[in-house]
Amino acid sequence: VVFSNGSYIDISAPRGKGPDLLSGDLELRDLRVNAMAWSPSLGFVDPLGGLDDLRDGVLRATSITALTDDPLRALRCWRLAIQLDMSLSCELRDDLRGLSLDEIAGERTASELQQILLHPGAPVAIEGLAEAGILQQLLPGAKRLALFRRCMQRSYESPALQRCLAAVYNEGDSWIVGLRLGWLL
Protein backbone atom coordinates (compact mmCIF):
# COMPACT_ATOMS: atom_id res chain seq x y z
CA VAL A 1 0.00 0.00 0.00
CA VAL A 2 1.52 3.32 -1.08
CA PHE A 3 0.44 6.46 0.74
CA SER A 4 0.27 9.97 -0.76
CA ASN A 5 3.36 11.04 1.20
CA GLY A 6 5.44 8.31 -0.49
CA SER A 7 5.64 5.93 2.46
CA TYR A 8 4.39 2.43 2.00
CA ILE A 9 3.44 -0.78 3.74
CA ASP A 10 4.32 -4.06 2.07
CA ILE A 11 1.55 -6.61 2.44
CA SER A 12 1.84 -10.17 1.19
CA ALA A 13 0.45 -13.58 1.94
CA PRO A 14 2.65 -15.70 4.23
CA ARG A 15 4.87 -18.20 2.42
CA GLY A 16 5.77 -20.16 5.53
CA LYS A 17 4.64 -23.66 6.31
CA GLY A 18 3.79 -25.48 9.48
CA PRO A 19 1.67 -24.54 12.45
CA ASP A 20 3.13 -21.03 12.77
CA LEU A 21 2.80 -19.46 9.32
CA LEU A 22 4.25 -16.11 10.42
CA SER A 23 7.48 -17.53 11.88
CA GLY A 24 7.81 -19.83 8.89
CA ASP A 25 7.47 -16.85 6.58
CA LEU A 26 10.01 -14.80 8.52
CA GLU A 27 12.55 -17.62 8.30
CA LEU A 28 12.39 -17.32 4.49
CA ARG A 29 13.58 -13.69 4.57
CA ASP A 30 17.08 -12.66 3.57
CA LEU A 31 18.43 -10.98 6.72
CA ARG A 32 17.55 -11.47 10.35
CA VAL A 33 16.77 -7.74 10.71
CA ASN A 34 14.16 -8.25 7.98
CA ALA A 35 12.70 -11.26 9.76
CA MET A 36 10.80 -9.33 12.41
CA ALA A 37 7.09 -8.61 12.36
CA TRP A 38 4.20 -7.37 14.39
CA SER A 39 1.01 -9.38 14.50
CA PRO A 40 -2.27 -8.16 16.02
CA SER A 41 -2.72 -11.52 17.74
CA LEU A 42 0.92 -12.30 18.65
CA GLY A 43 2.50 -8.89 19.08
CA PHE A 44 6.19 -8.51 18.20
CA VAL A 45 7.60 -11.65 16.55
CA ASP A 46 11.37 -12.09 16.17
CA PRO A 47 12.16 -15.79 15.76
CA LEU A 48 15.75 -15.30 14.50
CA GLY A 49 17.09 -12.54 16.74
CA GLY A 50 16.88 -9.65 14.30
CA LEU A 51 16.41 -7.10 17.06
CA ASP A 52 19.72 -8.16 18.63
CA ASP A 53 21.42 -7.75 15.24
CA LEU A 54 19.87 -4.30 14.90
CA ARG A 55 21.16 -3.31 18.35
CA ASP A 56 24.63 -4.74 17.54
CA GLY A 57 24.74 -3.01 14.15
CA VAL A 58 25.49 -6.27 12.33
CA LEU A 59 23.66 -7.83 9.41
CA ARG A 60 23.36 -11.62 9.41
CA ALA A 61 21.65 -13.86 6.86
CA THR A 62 18.73 -16.00 7.90
CA SER A 63 20.35 -18.91 6.04
CA ILE A 64 22.73 -19.60 3.17
CA THR A 65 19.78 -20.63 1.00
CA ALA A 66 18.28 -17.16 1.45
CA LEU A 67 21.23 -15.87 -0.56
CA THR A 68 21.49 -18.66 -3.12
CA ASP A 69 17.73 -18.52 -3.79
CA ASP A 70 18.09 -14.88 -4.88
CA PRO A 71 21.72 -13.81 -5.40
CA LEU A 72 20.60 -10.20 -5.88
CA ARG A 73 20.42 -10.17 -2.10
CA ALA A 74 24.21 -9.76 -2.15
CA LEU A 75 23.71 -6.24 -3.47
CA ARG A 76 20.81 -5.70 -1.13
CA CYS A 77 22.94 -6.66 1.88
CA TRP A 78 25.51 -4.02 1.06
CA ARG A 79 22.84 -1.42 0.26
CA LEU A 80 21.17 -1.99 3.60
CA ALA A 81 24.52 -1.97 5.41
CA ILE A 82 25.36 1.52 4.17
CA GLN A 83 21.82 2.84 4.51
CA LEU A 84 21.44 1.57 8.08
CA ASP A 85 25.09 2.22 9.02
CA MET A 86 25.62 -1.45 9.85
CA SER A 87 28.32 -3.97 9.04
CA LEU A 88 28.11 -7.43 7.54
CA SER A 89 28.97 -10.36 9.80
CA CYS A 90 32.03 -12.40 8.84
CA GLU A 91 29.73 -15.32 8.04
CA LEU A 92 27.61 -13.18 5.73
CA ARG A 93 30.70 -11.85 3.94
CA ASP A 94 31.87 -15.44 3.42
CA ASP A 95 28.43 -16.52 2.20
CA LEU A 96 28.42 -13.76 -0.43
CA ARG A 97 31.64 -15.02 -2.04
CA GLY A 98 31.06 -17.00 -5.17
CA LEU A 99 27.42 -16.01 -5.70
CA SER A 100 26.61 -15.75 -9.40
CA LEU A 101 24.41 -12.92 -10.62
CA ASP A 102 24.05 -14.45 -14.12
CA GLU A 103 20.36 -15.24 -13.78
CA ILE A 104 19.33 -11.90 -12.24
CA ALA A 105 17.31 -9.48 -14.37
CA GLY A 106 19.32 -6.44 -15.36
CA GLU A 107 16.63 -4.07 -14.11
CA ARG A 108 16.80 -5.48 -10.59
CA THR A 109 20.58 -5.34 -10.56
CA ALA A 110 20.64 -1.80 -11.94
CA SER A 111 18.14 -0.60 -9.33
CA GLU A 112 20.15 -1.95 -6.39
CA LEU A 113 23.44 -0.74 -7.83
CA GLN A 114 22.03 2.73 -8.44
CA GLN A 115 20.87 2.99 -4.83
CA ILE A 116 24.32 1.96 -3.65
CA LEU A 117 26.16 4.40 -5.92
CA LEU A 118 23.95 7.33 -4.90
CA HIS A 119 24.62 6.78 -1.19
CA PRO A 120 27.54 8.55 0.55
CA GLY A 121 28.68 5.16 1.90
CA ALA A 122 29.09 3.76 -1.63
CA PRO A 123 32.89 3.25 -1.36
CA VAL A 124 32.43 0.83 1.55
CA ALA A 125 29.82 -1.17 -0.36
CA ILE A 126 31.85 -1.18 -3.58
CA GLU A 127 34.89 -2.47 -1.72
CA GLY A 128 32.81 -5.23 -0.11
CA LEU A 129 31.27 -6.19 -3.45
CA ALA A 130 34.73 -6.34 -5.02
CA GLU A 131 36.07 -8.55 -2.20
CA ALA A 132 33.17 -10.96 -2.73
CA GLY A 133 33.78 -11.12 -6.50
CA ILE A 134 30.41 -9.53 -7.22
CA LEU A 135 31.60 -6.19 -8.58
CA GLN A 136 33.45 -7.97 -11.38
CA GLN A 137 30.17 -9.58 -12.44
CA LEU A 138 28.38 -6.24 -12.47
CA LEU A 139 31.12 -4.28 -14.19
CA PRO A 140 33.15 -6.66 -16.33
CA GLY A 141 34.92 -3.62 -17.75
CA ALA A 142 36.60 -3.16 -14.37
CA LYS A 143 38.53 -6.37 -14.94
CA ARG A 144 39.47 -5.24 -18.44
CA LEU A 145 40.62 -1.87 -17.14
CA ALA A 146 42.83 -3.61 -14.58
CA LEU A 147 44.37 -5.72 -17.35
CA PHE A 148 44.81 -2.61 -19.46
CA ARG A 149 46.56 -0.85 -16.58
CA ARG A 150 48.98 -3.77 -16.35
CA CYS A 151 49.59 -3.57 -20.11
CA MET A 152 50.48 0.11 -19.79
CA GLN A 153 53.08 -0.73 -17.17
CA ARG A 154 54.84 -3.23 -19.40
CA SER A 155 57.68 -2.39 -21.73
CA TYR A 156 57.05 -3.20 -25.38
CA GLU A 157 59.72 -3.24 -28.05
CA SER A 158 57.46 -2.34 -30.95
CA PRO A 159 57.35 1.46 -31.43
CA ALA A 160 53.97 1.12 -33.21
CA LEU A 161 52.49 -0.73 -30.25
CA GLN A 162 53.94 1.82 -27.85
CA ARG A 163 52.36 4.66 -29.88
CA CYS A 164 48.95 2.92 -29.87
CA LEU A 165 49.02 2.36 -26.14
CA ALA A 166 50.23 5.90 -25.48
CA ALA A 167 47.40 7.24 -27.65
CA VAL A 168 44.93 6.25 -24.95
CA TYR A 169 46.06 9.25 -22.96
CA ASN A 170 46.00 11.67 -25.91
CA GLU A 171 43.03 13.53 -27.20
CA GLY A 172 42.02 12.64 -30.73
CA ASP A 173 40.66 9.69 -32.63
CA SER A 174 43.68 7.42 -32.15
CA TRP A 175 42.86 6.88 -28.47
CA ILE A 176 40.00 4.56 -29.48
CA VAL A 177 42.41 2.29 -31.36
CA GLY A 178 44.81 2.35 -28.43
CA LEU A 179 42.08 1.53 -25.94
CA ARG A 180 40.77 -1.37 -28.00
CA LEU A 181 44.28 -2.65 -28.59
CA GLY A 182 45.06 -2.41 -24.89
CA TRP A 183 41.94 -4.40 -24.00
CA LEU A 184 42.84 -7.10 -26.51
CA LEU A 185 46.28 -7.45 -24.92
Image: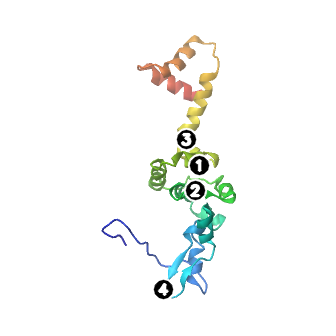
Tell me the CA gap for discs 1 and 2: 8 Å
What amino acid does circle 1 point to?
A: Leu
Q: Mark 4 or 3 closer to N-term?
A: 4
Q: Mark 3 or 1 closer to N-term?
A: 1
Q: Which residue is mark 1?
A: 129
Q: Mark 3 or 2 closer to N-term?
A: 2
Front-lying residue, 24 or 92: 92
Q: Position of residue 75 (x, y in %)?
A: 54, 55
Q: Which mark is residue 40?
A: 4
Q: Mark 4 or 1 closer to N-term?
A: 4
Q: Residues within 10 Å of mark 3 (few under 14, many from 20)?
A: few
Tell me the CA gap for discs 4 and 1: 39 Å
What amino acid does circle 3 point to?
A: Pro
Q: Nearer the viewer, mark 3 or mark 2?
A: 2
Tell me the CA gap for discs 2 and 4: 32 Å
Give left or right: position of 15 versus 118: right
What amino acid does circle 2 point to?
A: Ala
Q: Which residue is mark 2?
A: 74
What amino acid does circle 4 point to?
A: Pro
Q: Nearer the viewer, mark 2 or mark 4?
A: 4
Q: Nearer the viewer, mark 4 or mark 3?
A: 4
Where on the picture, by quarter, is residue 57? Answer: bottom right
Tell me the CA gap for discs 4 and 3: 48 Å
Q: Nearer the viewer, mark 3 or mark 1?
A: 1
Q: Secondary structure at mark 3?
A: helix
Q: Which residue is mark 3?
A: 140
Residues under numbered marks 1 and 2 in contact, where contact means CB atoms less than 8 Å apart: yes
Q: Mark 2 or 4 closer to N-term?
A: 4
Q: Position of residue 142 (x, y in %)?
A: 55, 38
Where on the picture, by quarter, is residue 156? Answer: top right
Q: Secondary structure at mark 1?
A: helix
